[in-house]
Image (cartoon, rainbow, N blue to C red):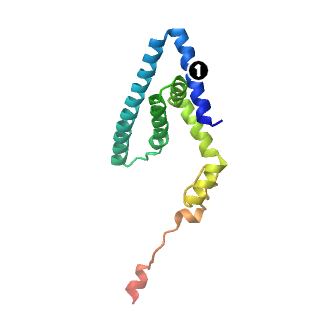
Amino acid sequence: MPVAFIFLVLEILAFALVASVIGWGWALLLIIAGSMAGLMLLRVSNLQMAEKLRQKMATGKPVDDEMREFPFRMIAGFLLFMPGFITDAIAMICLIPEVRRAVLRHILRSRHFSQHMHRHYPGANTPNQQKPKATRNDSRTIEGEYWKDDDKKSK
């Protein structure tokens, strides 16, 4: 059986369970409200992201945190928009900051991610990759030409 079919059956069962507890009308209203919340989250999340990026780029600050959390908000908005209580629950989990951070740590530490970054972005440092340590001479080396003022005067 395809996974999508199993998921659809689980969503229908969840809807029937919730509807048997709170009533069909209220369950349907919750589904519609969840979809509306998903649309609003998608819209607000895009606008907030654009504003934060604009502010950070104007001040020259890195935008790493915003870029890492943005996909979670987009996924949560999309899952809320899809009708169903299971997708709504998964969306709510995506919105919890601790969960986002834990998932990001797991992704960034995974071997597959490190291999992908190393293969496609050779200059990028990943958490699993050792950064080269600067030696004492490296931090004081300045390339260029020089001459002593005494040599100039004597010629």
The spot of residue 54 in percent (x, y) is 34, 44
Residue in the image at 45% along x and 17% along y: 28
Residue in the image at 42% along x and 22% along y: 32
Q: Secondary structure at mark 1?
A: helix
16 relative to 151, above or below: above
Decide which of 142, 106 is in the foreground and name it.
Answer: 106
The spot of residue 128 in percent (x, y) is 64, 50
Residue in the image at 34% along x and 37% along y: 47
Decide which of 64, 106 is in the foreground and name it.
Answer: 106
Please indicate whether residue 126 sits to the left or right of residue 52 in the image. right
Residue in the image at 40% along x and 88% along y: 154
Amino acid residing under circle 1: Leu
The spot of residue 27 in percent (x, y) is 48, 15
* Label 1 Cα crowd, 10 Å radius (few <14 / some 14-19 / many 20+): some
Q: Which image quarter holds the N terminus?
A: top right
Please indicate whether residue 18 sits to the left or right of residue 38 in the image. right
Residue named by callout 1: 13
- Residue extending furthest toward the bottom: 155
Decide which of 123, 145 is in the foreground and name it.
Answer: 123
